Image (tube, helix red, strand yellow):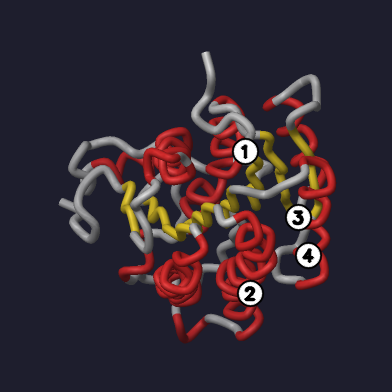
Amino acid sequence: MAGRLDGQVALVTGAARGIGAATATRLAADGAAVALADLDEAQAQATAQQVDPSGEQVLAIGCNVAESAQVQQMVDRTIERFGRLDILVNNAGITRDNLLFKMGEDDWDAVINVHLRGAFLCARAAQKPMVEQKHGRIISLSSVSALGNRGQVNYSAAKAGIQGLTRTLAIELGPFGITANAVAPGFIDTDMTRATAERLGLTPEQAQAAATTRIALRRIGQPSEVASVIAFLASEDASYVNGQIIYVNGGPAGITM
């Protein structure tokens, strides 16, 4: 049975674990060849081995998405290996949470650079081959935190910026057959949310239990559920979806009760 992404090539940043790993797994299952990029190249290689033990349809790349030269090399290596680039998933991200009066400039810069600068650099590098082939999908990870979240002024600003970036990419690149959309997850069970819980002095289980009382579906989300939405946006089923922000939040965006 043919997959809906057969013959296409995807590049997923932050693909070593969490939503990125789930996305790489789902896109590969749908038939795409997948380049898995991550700052942690060893873990990216381990994840790639899990996605495709044969290694034929995967490529692991070490990359700091905040560095322009590394981003260009990442895109070049993907095209050298697979011959084209159809799908870019901007997923790489970090957190450096703190209240405004405690937040240092380094923590602000680190989060903005990885999320927002990284998405810009990756989109800029990927658009060239996509424009030449008159087809492409750029899917970026925003967050419900884009609506504002205590202790995350840097992360919230970056994720809100990704929404503006996405809408503008949709306008500029739409005439070349390229769509740009963003997915904004709510509480998803990942290493990042577990680390946030520990920062707050909670166990991951305590944080998850508290979150479920504020989510309409009364449960937290799984990385695979975000990956399913990304896979839809990457496919021809979403060929007329462009410039949209899709919240994967177990309820309406901004509604937590």
Q: Say few, some or many: other residues with alpha carbon within 10 Å of mark 1 (under 14 / 14 to 19 / 20 or more).
A: many
Q: Name the residue under label 1.
A: 8
Which comes before the other along the chain, label 1 or label 3?
Answer: 1
Question: Label 3 amino acid?
Answer: Leu
| Tag in front: 1 or 3 | 1
Question: Label 4 amino acid?
Answer: Gln
Q: Mark 3 points at which residue?
A: 39
| Tag in front: 2 or 1 | 1
Instruction: Check residue 113 in the rendering and tell me which mark sits there, or answer none.
Output: 2
Question: Dot 3 lies on which element?
Answer: loop
- The front one of 14 and 139 is 139
Q: Say few, some or many: other residues with alpha carbon within 10 Å of mark 3 (under 14 / 14 to 19 / 20 or more).
A: some
Q: Say few, some or many: other residues with alpha carbon within 10 Å of mark 4 (under 14 / 14 to 19 / 20 or more).
A: some
Which comes before the other along the chain, label 2 or label 4?
Answer: 4
Q: Is residue 219 above or below residue 143?
A: above
Residue at position x 34%, y 53% in the image: 241
- Measure the alpha-carbon separation of dots 2 and 1: 29 Å
Q: Mark 4 points at which residue?
A: 72
Residue at position x 62%, y 38% in the image: 8
Percent position (x, y) of residue 127?
62, 64
Whether residue 113 is visible: yes
Instruction: Check residue 120 in the rendering and tell me which mark sits there, or answer none.
Output: none
Question: Label 1 amino acid?
Answer: Gln
